Image: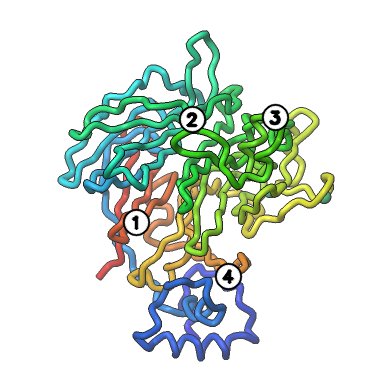
Amino acid sequence: MRLSVARRTVPAMRPARAAVALAAALALLSPAVPAGAAPERGADRDRASERAARPALQVTTRVAGLSHPWDVQELPSGSLLVTERQPARLTLSRPDGAKRTIAFPTGRIWTSGETGLMGLAVDPAFGQNRRFYTCSGWRKAGGGHDVRVISWTLDGAERRATQRRTLLRGLPTTSGRHGGCRLLIARDGSLVVGTGDAAVGTNPRNLRSLGGKTLRLDRFTGKPWRTNPFRKAANRTKRYVTTYGHRNVQGLAQRRDGTLWSVEHGSYRDDEVNLLRRGGDYGWQPVPGYDESVPMTDQRLPGKQIAAKWRSGRPTIATSGATFVYGRQWGSYAGGLWVAALGGERLVVMKFGGKGGLRSTTRPAELDGDFGRLRTVTQRRNGDVLVATDGADGQGRILLVRPRG
Ligand SMILES: [Ca+2]
Ligand SMILES: [Ca+2]
């Protein structure tokens, strides 16, 4: 049994299945069965991957000198684009390590508390259209502020961003608390937006508010996405809503089987990882006022509330950005959802079965406690993983993670 050497691992597998898993693990030794490939295809293979080797991880600093880096994405040139929440800066790090601040209207970004320059997505056709997308606080021309999703183009010299279009405005804000906001371009080309409830108790369940939701839209026109569950609603805001009843969505990820997942911060309990279903109610409704004593998924609400696939219980670890990581070099970490934790100052690799059931959670020792708060995780095209740390005042970093070997 290799279970005993799995440091800090909580296997969700029942002992009765061990014999089956052992047989599957032996089958995995055949090179014809790549570890980590399409884990949703078969439960046996999934269980087998639990037993595959966990590679030792090599962690180095790829970019230093950042302030609250919030998201990082790779460009086709190999340069990394980084959003820094506060002070609302867009930074580029070239493959040779040279770093520069992109000319960008930082002064228009509203920064307060948890809100600033946040989510970032790079267009799949960036090589042709040079587009990328941000979600950020925004100072309205006539005073006041909201959170907006905006498309930009980056010039060929990678020095200047030009605003193309405000795709979505009016995401609610109050003090800056619970401002969201994560972006993901799904494989069908839609732009998915994970939002926060702005610490207003009625927002998550109000389908005329963009707060406490996942939203989906056309990344070129900003129109509601064609498969949205309420796309025919009379109310325009409602047409954007994909799921509701969220507290503060900090992570969005798509698995190879096409399923979409969100990661969100719990209250005093229960950070959650949710498998998103169109039109689903995820059960956060902290009223009257902003009463955080209610459950993160309150089944007493009318209708059906969808339970989380993973929850932290108590204490919370403030789970944030996440991505499904693939590639056989990652051994049993492959196919897992790699989740960054802020308060917990760790990375957690969660393995889920084909139907979304939790199989195991692992805390790689190499990314546990040594780098402060971890904000998000991204996988590069070459398979390497990038992890953003949340350091303030130039202490934030982008870490490069590879299997040691
Ligand atoms: Ca929930
Ligand atoms: Ca109910």
Q: Is residue 121 above or below residue 7?
A: above
Residue neighbourhood size for the residue with mark 3, other residues' Cα within 10 Å, grouped as few (<14), some (14–19), many (≥20): few
Q: Could you tell me if the residues under marks 1 and 4 are in contact, i.e. CB atoms within 8 Å?
A: no
Q: Amino acid at mark 4?
A: Gly
Locate residue 266, reporting x and y percent. 63, 45
Q: Is residue 250 above or below residue 364?
A: above
Residue neighbourhood size for the residue with mark 4, other residues' Cα within 10 Å, grouped as few (<14), some (14–19), many (≥20): some
Locate residue 9, reporting x and y percent. 52, 69
Q: Which mark is residue 235?
A: 3
Locate residue 243, reporting x and y percent. 65, 45
Q: Which mark is residue 167?
A: 2
Pick the residue in front: 260 or 318.
260
Decide if residue 268 is in sight here.
no
Q: Which circle's residue, 3 or 1, is located before the other in the chain?
A: 3
Left or right? Give the position of 151 relative to 380: right
Would you identify the image quadrant in which residue 198 lies? Answer: top right
Q: Which circle's residue, 1 or 4, is located before the other in the chain?
A: 4
Q: Which circle's residue, 4 or 3, is located before the other in the chain?
A: 3
Q: Could you tell me if the residues under marks 4 and 2 are in contact, i.e. CB atoms within 8 Å?
A: no
Image quarter (top left, top right, bottom left or bottom right) of the C terminus: bottom left
Q: CA distance from mark 4 to mark 2?
A: 35 Å
Q: CA distance from mark 3 to mark 1?
A: 41 Å
Q: Amino acid at mark 1?
A: Val
Q: Amino acid at mark 3?
A: Asn
Residue drawn 31% across the image and 50% down it: 399
Pick the residue in front: 277 or 182.
277
Query: Does dot 3 land on a helix, a strand or a loop?
Result: loop
Q: Which mark is residue 385?
A: 1
Label 4, on which residue?
353
